Amino acid sequence: MVKFLLVRLLGTIPVLIGVSVLVFAMVRLVPGDPIDMMFTNLAPPSPEQREQIRKDMGLDKPIYLQYTSFVGNALRGDLGKSYRTKRPVSEEIRNRLPNTIKLTIASLALSTLIGVVAGVMAATFKNTWLDFLSMLVAIVGVSIPGFWLGLMIMMLFSVKLGWFPVAGADTWKHLVLPTVTLGVLASAILARMTRSAMLDVLNQDYVRTARAKGLVEWIVVMRHAFRNALVPIVTILGLQIGGLLSGAFIIEAVFAYPGIGMLAVQALANRDFPLIQGIVLLVAVIYVVVNLVVDMLYSVLDPRVRHG
Amino acid sequence: MGREETPTVTEVRESVDRPTVQNTSQLRVSRSPGQLVLMRLLRSRQSVVGLTIVALLILMALLAPIIAPANPTKQDLINQFIAPGRDHLFGTDEFGRDIFSRIIYGARISLQVGLIAVGIAMVVGTLIGLIGGYYGGWFDMVTQRLIEIMLAFPGLLLALAIIAVLGNGIQNVMIAVGVGSVPSYARLVRAQVMAAKEKDYVEAARAIGARDVRLISKHIFPEVISSLIVLSSLGIAGAILSAAALSFIGLGAQPPTPEWGAMLSQGRDFLRDQWWITTFPGIFIAFTVLGFNLLGDGLRDALDPQGNR
């Protein structure tokens, strides 16, 4: 067990290094001088100023030194300064991150509730109208663009009915519509996965045995089948968090919800590279860590994995 | 795929009745495997719906200049914000452009994006998977590590980062979405190649002196094709959705291009009174994606009848 965890933990190190190289390279690959980008809407700097900035930013050093200082700074929480606001990127992110975390957790909870219940029901009542209906809703849910669903929900509940605010994140009411949008969409995938995981398990011999010895059907479903279907479902949850985090980029923009997603969209529009870099790096690291945790959970749920 | 005519019921029934008799030489002469798949596909209501949607969409894109009642980019400021009605089926936008015509032309863009993005992902991913899976070694090592790194960026994040570097525009969106989907294809192909190369018939072909290129192209690659077809149908759906989302946040198609995601984005300011500007492009994105998803699901069932779903 310890060995499995250790190997898995060490395995993330090269991935994180790779991620940092890619994110570092991002800005260097952009055609043009980064200093020009800082002055997009301002008067161009004089050659002396230019030289000074180059020195301040360490752009005069060899590329590998630039990389090591980038990583060193990032580890200390210093991600540079926004071209636009001139404030530290870490501060910008820290102001917005709690909102995104709230949104991600709320929609994860909602999607898990809807998705797992719908999937278990569909599998238990396979080939009935209930199964048909939930899978129809699921495939439609996978196909609907999130930003459009968000706009439609907003049009109905904020604009027409006035039940919820149109934009912002000051009260819990601001959280409701983005959560519903993200949660409903994510539940569609989860429902499909849960259904097929449950169907695999429900065909197993021990389920038949459980039924044969006269157990009530819901005990068979919940205690014998669902417990074992959890492994694939938990794996999907890890992916879900990634999907929700990146889905939040678009949905936050729809609802003008001030999380890191909206921050990223603004940063992309302004070509504010330190900010883009910081957000991309942060989300990737969060995602790698979440998947690490999921893998560990995995081995708790399924003892076979530890020896695999 | 050379399917010139729909098989008659008797033909199919014959081929269904004696599947065990078929050997490889027969498979090559008769068209029955293709017919079988088509037959299974047509038997499922979901796939028929998917196939119909996709076919209608392709027709719409091909015949756009004939069907569209107006020029999709021509502004007509006197007729702005006309509600859907007889003159303008889906109404007009803030520049007086006919939304119905814009949607018809938009089908061209969406299909193009889907095909090109998936094309990039499929070609690059398949090559990586074939070479890496067959030879292993350093190439496999390096590409697999790269893929792990790419997979550390969830969902659209990698595409966003690529667009940040390349700049905005629909071409760059196609590249970004395509590159972002390379890992799924590479992993799928690699896993199947590794399974296929251990099979007896591949061993036999090697024993009679077949070279690597021949082994890969004639014996191993065909094993992968059916999964690739399924993945690319679902992939087109995903690519269209991603590209629309990227255009929605302003990174993709730029005005006045009639791209559905960008049209939707333009309509955001008029949600209260001009609902049609956002509603119709969204419905078309959803139907297009639904069509490819249903088709992909149907193809999976048709190509793998043993699957238990």
Image (cartoon, helix red, strand yellow):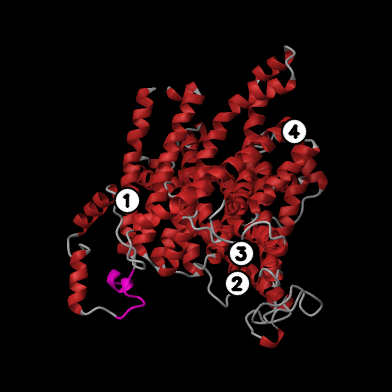
Marks 1 and 3 on same chain: no
Q: Amino acid at mark 3?
A: Leu
Q: Secondary structure at mark 1?
A: helix
Instruction: Give the spatial CA distance, label 1 vs label 4.
Output: 46 Å
Residue linked to disc 2: B266
Please, what is the three-letter code of the amino acid marked with disc 2?
Gln
Magenta stretch: helix, strand or loop mostly: loop
Q: Which residue is mark 4?
A: A126
Q: Nearer the viewer, residue A197 or B270?
A: B270
Residue A194: percent from left, percent from top? 63, 35
Q: Which mark is residue A20?
A: 1
Say left or right for A87 vs A235: left
Q: Residue at x 59, y 68 (%)?
A: B265
SS of the residue under disc 3: helix
How far is mark 3 from mark 4, CA to CA? 35 Å
Report which quarter residue A308 is drawn in: top left
Furthest residue toward front: A171
| Three-letter residue code for mark 4 | Lys
Question: Up-down: is B134 above or below B20?
Answer: below
Label 3 neighbour load within 10 Å: few <14, some 14-19, many 20+ = many
Which element carries disc 4, helix, strand or loop? Answer: loop
Which residue does the image show at 64% across and 29% down from the upper left? A200
